[in-house]
Image (tube, coloured by chain):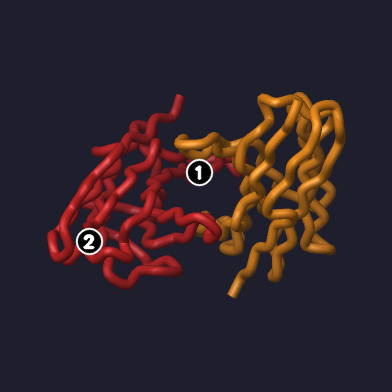
Amino acid sequence: DVKVTQSSRYLVKRTGEKVFLECVQDMDHENMFWYRQDPGLGLRLIYFSYDVKMKEKGDIPEGYSVSREKKERFSLILESASTNQTSMYLCASRGTSGGTDTQYFGPGTRLTVL
Amino acid sequence: ELKVEQNPLFLSMQEGKNYTIYCNYSTTSDRLYWYRQDPGKSLESLFVLLSNGAVKQEGRLMASLDTKARLSTLHITAAVHDLSATYFCAVDSSGGSNYKLTFGKGTLLTVNP
């Protein structure tokens, strides 16, 4: 079974703090994704990565950056957290072999910025 | 810009009844995915539809894809309480090149006894 883990289930930070959210997958997947989920807005893609050290902006990258130094790990960074970044953050991964693969999601990190 | 619209966004139904959730999208794609999310949990893959006319069934749920109409449906047959969850459709507009998905806003399904 594919396993995607995220470093924290719940996180509380203060405005202006630097926040790191980490995601690890154990299936040697090339593609990894960071989404945020907000009520009424569904899932919105922040950044994705299709290989080590490669990244592309998603639909809402402002205020975020990412790092992928190893294939299995994809980090989301909030350089200076703000209250409007309070949200559920979901990481996903997906392989490129086979056409039927789907994205596999981690358990999510609920971030509250005070 | 790809837009994915689900309707209804809220669905309250009685056990034993049938209903359909619709997912419309705005640009050409032949890759569509359905996910389920239980409260407080993450997303779980339900169906992967990869061609026009694709139909997949699992238990009381059946999903289909019409790429010409840019429409997918998720049909619920004889609903039971365990199906209560939020259902998302997602469309891959990259042609399979980077697997970037655009999600609908989700349909919150409540099945009442």
Residue situated in front as seen by the camera: A38 or A78: A38
Q: Which residue is mark 1?
A: A103
In the rendered image, residue B80, in percent from the top left (x then y), is placed at: 75, 25
Q: Residue at x 53, y 61 (%)?
A: A41
Screen quadrant of the C terminus of chain A: bottom left
Q: Residue at x 70, y 64 (%)?
A: B25
**Chain B drawn in what color?**
orange
| Label 1, residues with CA under 10 Å away: few <14, some 14-19, many ≥20 | many
Residue situated in front as seen by the camera: B55 or A7: A7
| Label 2, residues with CA under 10 Å away: few <14, some 14-19, many ≥20 | some
- 2 vs 1, front mark: 2
Q: Which residue is mark 2?
A: A78
Drawn side of residue A106 relative to residue B95, left or right: left
Drawn side of residue B75 relative to residue B10, left or right: right
Q: Residue at x 39, y 62 (%)?
A: A46
Badge 2 amino acid: Leu
